[in-house]
Image (cartoon, helix red, strand yellow):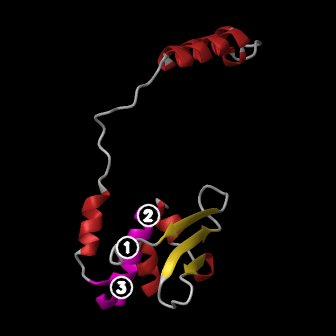
Amino acid sequence: LNIIRSAIASVYRVIHLHRPPIASDQLVIQYFEARRRKEEKLPNSTQEIYDVKVLLQATLSWGSTSELTMSKLQLKTLTLLTIATTWRQRSDMGTLQFREVKFQMKEGVEDEPLGVTLTARNPKELRPKQSKLGAIENRVACPAHTLWTF
């Protein structure tokens, strides 16, 4: 349909030099809008979705968070945060600054974060975005605990 539309538009332009383009004709616009509404695209149920379990298991196989080297700890922290927030790795996570990370701590316990709030001030989407992550019981797989350790 797009090929036919392009062919008609290019021929129309040659034949009718002094008329406005056919694409601006109201009848043509209504036809293509109706055509678009008529075609229903069903979701592809066979399309595969990436399973983060493999990435999570590989990250957790590195061992205890407190025993990791600084570079492995940084990689683990970024991996867990990226999975939990679904933010972009480079443009969102890569520009995250210390002032944009706010921890909610358990009252009376200094080393026990209840959660963390991350704010991306300049994401690709133009508007700042925020993610609030709660702590989970499994401290080894918890993005909040791993970020606190980092």
Find residue 93 and report its horizontal and vertical position in percent: 50, 69
Given the image, on which type of amino acid does mark 3 rest?
Ser
Up-down relation of residue 104 to residue 133 (above or below): below
Q: Residue at x 32, y 33 (%)?
A: 45
C-alpha separation, residue under disc 3 versus residue under disc 2: 20 Å
Mark 2, Cα crowd under 10 Å, few <14 / some 14-19 / many 20+, is some
At 31% from the left and 51% from the top, the residue drawn is 50
Q: Residue at x 45, y 65 (%)?
A: 89
Q: Secondary structure at mark 1?
A: loop
Q: Secondary structure at mark 3?
A: helix
138 sits to left or right of 131: left
The boundaries of the magenta stretch are: 64-84
What amino acid type should be assigned to the residue bearing mark 2?
A: Ala
**Residue named by callout 3:** 71
Give the structural element (helix, strand or loop) at label 2.
helix
Is residue 32 in sight in this rendering? yes
Q: Earlier in the sequence, mark 3 or mark 2?
A: 3
Q: Residue at x 52, y 74 (%)?
A: 115
Is 16 placed left or right of 137 in the picture? right
Residue at the spot of label 2:
84
Type of the residue with mark 1: Glu
Quickly name the residue at label 1. Answer: 137
Position of residue 11 relative to residue 66, above or below, is above
Asked whether the viewer can see residue 95, the reply is no
Residue 62, image x and y in percent? 24, 79
Q: Nearer the viewer, mark 2 or mark 1?
A: 1
Q: For residue 84, what is the image quadrant?
A: bottom left
